[in-house]
Image (tube, grey):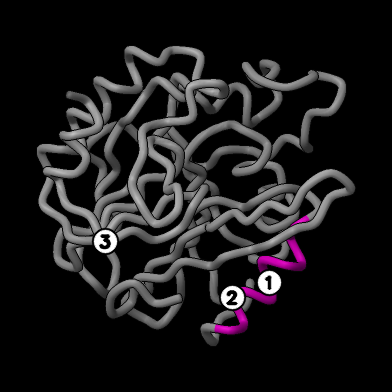
Amino acid sequence: MELASGVYGFPVTVSYPDRTLTITPAGVETPDGGLVLLDAGFPDTVDLLEDALAEEGFDYDDVEYLVLTHQDGDHAGGAAEIAERADAPVFAHRDDTPAIEGAKDPIKGDPSDRYDPVPVDVQVVDGVEIRTAVGPLQIVATPGHTPGHISCYVPDAGVLLAADASVAEDGELAGPNEHFTPDVERAYDSLDTLADLAFTDVLCFHGGHVEAGPEDVAALVE
């Protein structure tokens, strides 16, 4: 799913005994035709994500950087395997790095079921930019869902890669899933931050693509 030239969503659908779940990692092309991959999915969706990449003409060998938007297992669970297969450095916010690396337990879920830790090569903070073929990929700190949750913004493409800062429900933008958001007030403050950006398309990790702008994000806070 190409949201704009060089900006992709990679939907992955996995079936469990009690439900079917679709997650949507994202990617942005690099100047030499590679990929910045945003999020790794679950440990058991690594091969399914590889299939989703292939549908857009990529494979793990094309992944130059793996950016983890936060520590939750559906985003970082497959990171150790993907980083090894891609031979790619891992980026994450410094406040979620201890959980991703295994120095701390993730703040959600059963610690006995935690995913394989992975070293974070580059700790990012708000305002960091990654060079891509589409222009800068900007890191936007959006804490609340986790302490180090980030969203990513591609201003030259008018695309917001929201991760779990928001979700999409039936094609409409919604606020963060409060059941899985320990600091709901801070998460809504983060939406205020996103509402200050300029975009026409939003990709949510849960719910996928929505045509929406900053006014739609601002409305979630009102």
Q: Nearer the viewer, residue 52 or 115?
A: 52
* Helix, strand or loop for disc 1: helix
Q: Which residue is mark 1?
A: 50
Residue located at (70% from left, 42% from top): 77
Q: Is residue 66 left or right of residue 210?
A: right
Whole-angstrom CA distance, mark 1 to mark 2, is 5 Å
Residue at the front extreme, as displayed:
170
* Helix, strand or loop for disc 2: helix
Disc 2 crowd rating (10 Å Cα; few below 14, some 14-19, many 20+) is many
Name above or below for residue 67 compared with residue 116. below
Residue located at (77% from left, 47% from top): 19
What type is the residue that disc 1 sits on?
Answer: Glu
**Residue 177 lies in the magenta-colored region:** no
What type is the residue that disc 2 sits on?
Answer: Leu
Q: Is residue 179 left or right of residue 209?
A: right
Residue at the bottom extreme, as displayed:
57
Quadrant assignment for the C terminus: top left
Give the mark nearest the N terminus, 1 or 3.
1
Residue located at (33% from left, 15% from top): 186
Q: Nearer the viewer, mark 3 or mark 2?
A: 3
What type is the residue that disc 3 sits on?
Answer: Glu
Q: Nearer the viewer, residue 6 or 145?
A: 145
Residues at marks 1 and 2 touching, judged by CB atoms closer than 8 Å? yes
Q: Which residues are magenta?
A: 45-55
Residue 220 appears at what percent x and percent y? 25, 32
> Magenta stretch mostly in which secondary structure?
helix
Whole-angstrom CA distance, mark 3 to mark 2, is 22 Å
Q: Which residue is mark 3?
A: 211
Give the mark nearest the N terminus, 3 or 2.
2
Q: Which residue is mark 2?
A: 53
**Residue 52 lies in the magenta-colored region:** yes
* Helix, strand or loop for disc 3: strand
